[in-house]
Amino acid sequence: MKSKWFIVGLSPVLALSVVITSCSVGKKAKVENVNSAVADKLATQGRTTEAAEMYSRIGELLLIPEGIQYADEMFDKALAINPNDGKANFYSAITKPLMAAQGFITRMEPIVDANGSANLIKLKDAIDELRLPELIKFANELPAGKKQFESYYDVQRAVRTELLPAVAASVDKVAKLKAPLKLNINLSRLGLRSKNPKYNYTTEYSYENTYCQKGEWNQTTHNWECTSTITERNFYTTWTSNYDPTPTEYNLDDADLTIIRSAAQGALNSLRINTAYSIKGLEHLIKKWEAYERVHGKMNARSAVKLINAYSELGTLESDNLLSDVSKSAADTAKNMLDLATLQNDLCNNPARQYGSNLFTQICIIGSDLKNLQVLSDLLAGPKKVEFGGDNLTILMDVNAILYNPPRDLHALLPNAFDVYGNVSTLQDPTVGGLFPNGDLIEKLKANGTIKQGW
């Protein structure tokens, strides 16, 4: 069978404003060729480490800009024979959630409002402008067995059943990563360059060209052959650019991996919280709320609660999604980030890191970020008084109470008595599920003026 050519990238020369103060000379090109058929043979010979590394490298070359699904197949093959392959775990932690989002533009179209539709069109146009057929197809074509969403609730269920498990698996994968981890990928193919006007370089710069050839079907995947050509040019003297040169090689250290693990865990915790309680009927509630306020003006608390209570399924606990794990994992994440904060001399505004080969060239945890991390860490350690508005007001909070014993129905936490103006007088549960152990939320809201303003 004749092979089909699939061009996954011709890396651009920096599209910049560049001033070179002397001539340059080309150096010998470095050519790399990797082939999945060769990797298959290595695997059958028991050379699993070499095979996994080759599968991973093919996936890496396919990944950007438009070979996500093909790259994902290669990472699967690598992990099947070596579950601890660092490169495959790193990239698979990215591609699996992306695969769960395949066709997202088309799936979302029926349910977005005017503003959302405008944003969706902008995103679609931005993808179209890349002129990458496979990427356009990935974003727009519905996968087999999938259909368009008919409600926000459909989106929530898809996130819970499709995306959340993929992200949970990603957390496990990045937990296996060990430093140093070397990646070879040209992010400039998607225009990911950091702007830094008038930064001067006296350096070697590499131009990378990559193409991949898709061959015959082999049991579960296509055979792939990828060739990467790197041509180095040596500039004798200083040159000035409006952009930092985008590296094609990254060497991840422990700090890089901590950021990656924290981001993955944060995404998982967010998904767990946002999909635990049903949002069935939410879009209808929003429409009624907006219609009311167009006629009557701002809705008071009494009217708001009455409207919310009309939707009995909204706010009911459908799956606790291991909410108790959110507490421990978030506490661990906060601790790890606070540990990084003690290394700011090395991680923040350090030229050696900023212009080196780290994935995250600056990690600055200072000011409000540092304060918020410390507050989060304290809250997850147990009940704590926190600032509550101005005038030195504080309130005791116990975040773990609501994570370890989530209420079955959020309607039970709504106000049940109101004053003559429709403002809140009392709550059915003054502790709000144990979140405010002293039961003084209403008192504090009155003290800082929130209820007076018509909460």
Image (tube, rainbow, N blue to C red):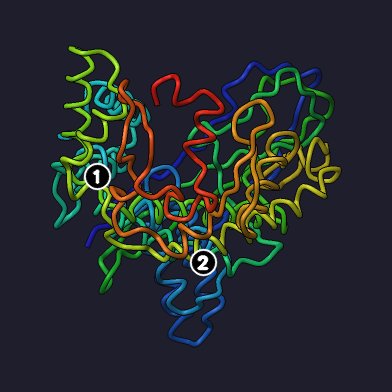
Residue 177 falls in image quadrant: bottom right
SS state under label 2: helix
Label 2 environment density (alpha carbons within 10 Å; few <14, some 14–19, many ≥20): many
- Where residue 315 appears, x then y in whole percent? 27, 49
The residue lying at 20 percent from left, 44 percent from top is 141
Residue 247 appears left or right of 125: right
Q: Nearer the viewer, residue 275 or 51?
A: 275
The residue pinned by badge 1 equals 103
- Residue 141 appearing in the image: yes
- In depth, the one of 16 and 373 nearer the eye is 373
- In the rendered image, residue 261, in percent from the top left (x then y), is placed at 59, 57
Residue position marked by numbered label 2 in the rendering = 173
Instruction: Tell which circle, 2 or 1, labels the residue nearer the N-terminal end.
Output: 1
User: What residue is at 43 percent from the left and 79 percent from the top?
Assistant: 41
Is any atom of residue 108 visible in this view? no
Identify the image quadrant of the C terminus.
top left
Dot 1 lies on which element? Answer: loop
Q: Which of 342 and 167 lies nearest the eye of the viewer? A: 342
Amino acid type, callout 2: Lys
The x and y percentages for residue 206 are 66, 40
Q: Is residue 250 above or below residue 222?
A: above
Q: Total number of numbered labels?
A: 2
Q: Amino acid at mark 1?
A: Gly
Residue placed furthest toward the front: 420
The quarter of the displayed image where residue 253 is located: bottom right
Instruction: Look at the picture and state if 232 lies above or below 235.
Output: below
Give the left or right position of residue 253, taking residue 423 as reference: right
